[in-house]
Image (cartoon, helix red, strand yellow):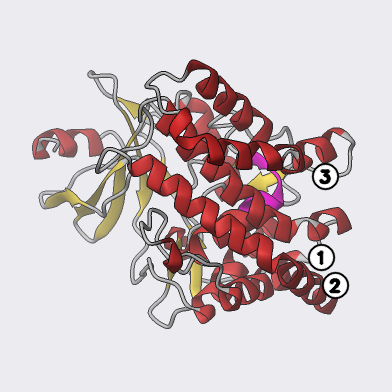
Amino acid sequence: MQDNQKLIDIAAHFITPTDIIEVKPLGAGHINDSFKVVNGNDEYVLQRINHSIFKNVDQLQKNIFRVTSHIRKKLEEAGETDIDRKVLTLIPTHDENLYYRDADGNYWRMTLFIKDSKSYDDINPDLAYRAGLAFGDFQRMLSDLPGEPLYETIPNFHNMEYRLESFRDAVKRDRVGRVMEVSDLIKEIEARANDMCRAERLHREGKLPKRINHCDTKVNNILFDYNDQVLCVVDLDTVMPGYVLSDFGDFIRTGANTGAEDDKNLDNVNLDLDIFKAYSEGYLENASDFLTDTEIENLAFGAKLLTYMQTVRFLTDYLDGDTYYKINYGNHNLVRSLAQFKLLLSMEEKFDQMHQMVLDTAAKHKR
């Protein structure tokens, strides 16, 4: 925990503190440390950026500034009101920088606090539909961002070929002697490997564009007002170039799983088709117009891809001796791998229905 006076001193690089200023912890983020700053009548969010994950803070902040500025411009052109609640507002330092580096080498940033908002961790079809609207609109507004592509804040984050290369290296190393124990699962992964690298192949063939992705499309990264209307998409650290099917698929992987990501009881783990259908409806209502036929054709595949990718990532970490993901018990990463693989099997079983739902919904919304 940071010393309170030190936090006030850091905040003072962004704002001019009043006589009454409060700084208190905000939320339970897994990556960055967040604090709410109350300065007189104004409220802000102060964050310590996790520099071990986001190696180039300058590029990270420039990405966020470009994205939020473009969305703000789109909202203004559309005649929206209350715009400060509908897009994140970065607060620069007094010398106009997008972040502050303290004497200990920590990086800090500040945004306006979005008042009268809430988020959800649990999902139902209505929220899934609204989340689809939010992420579809987010991608739509950014589909014409001018200038150079955004920086990759985490290189190769959703690159399946790269993830498989790391996985195969882990199998060869067998650093902690676990390969024999999971040989059946390794075979299952390899049996699907060629098909799961489809996105990279289509991109090289010029058939699948890279667009601006959120890359962490969970329902708790959307703020709602008290009437459950979408305010804005938040947690923009991983916004970078990617394939839309990855963003679509990652929401389905997390939101449409009837079990937990690390469920020990695999009978609990299945794909919820009602959630899948509702999210598809919301997403395609806002995204159909800018998506290509190839993107639409591969959206349902994106759900399989991201679930497969997460199976591979958890198993890679298990084989490497649990060096990346935090674990709560010895074989936690194996339990996660098996739960993700069970979800993948459920998706494979229901894939024809998923694919047809996407095609039917897209046809309905194409203008």
In the rendering, at what x and y percent does residue 69 appear? Answer: 58, 48
Gap in Å between the C-alphas at discs 2 and 3?
Answer: 19 Å
Residue beneath disc 3: 208
Q: Are marks 1 and 3 in contact (CB under 8 Å)?
A: no
Tell me which corner region of the image, top left, top right, bottom left or bottom right, holds residue 32: top left
Which residue type carries mark 1?
A: Asp
Which residue type carries mark 3?
A: Leu
**What secondary structure is marked by label 3?**
loop
Residue 162 among those drawn in magenta = no
Q: Is residue 101 left or right of residue 79?
A: left
Tell me which corner region of the image, top left, top right, bottom left or bottom right, holds residue 210: top right
Q: Residues within 10 Å of mark 2 (few under 14, many from 20)?
A: some
Q: Residue at x 56, y 25 (%)?
A: 166
Residue beneath disc 2: 366
In the rendering, at what x and y percent does residue 47 appear? Answer: 31, 41
Residue 270 versus residue 16: which sits nearer the camera? 270
Q: Residue at x 60, y 47 (%)?
A: 308
Gap in Å between the C-alphas at discs 1 and 3?
Answer: 16 Å
Q: Are marks 2 and 3 in contact (CB under 8 Å)?
A: no
Residue beneath disc 1: 289
N-terminal of the two: label 1 or label 3? 3
Which residue type carries mark 2?
A: Lys
Residue 7 versus residue 208: which sits nearer the camera? 208
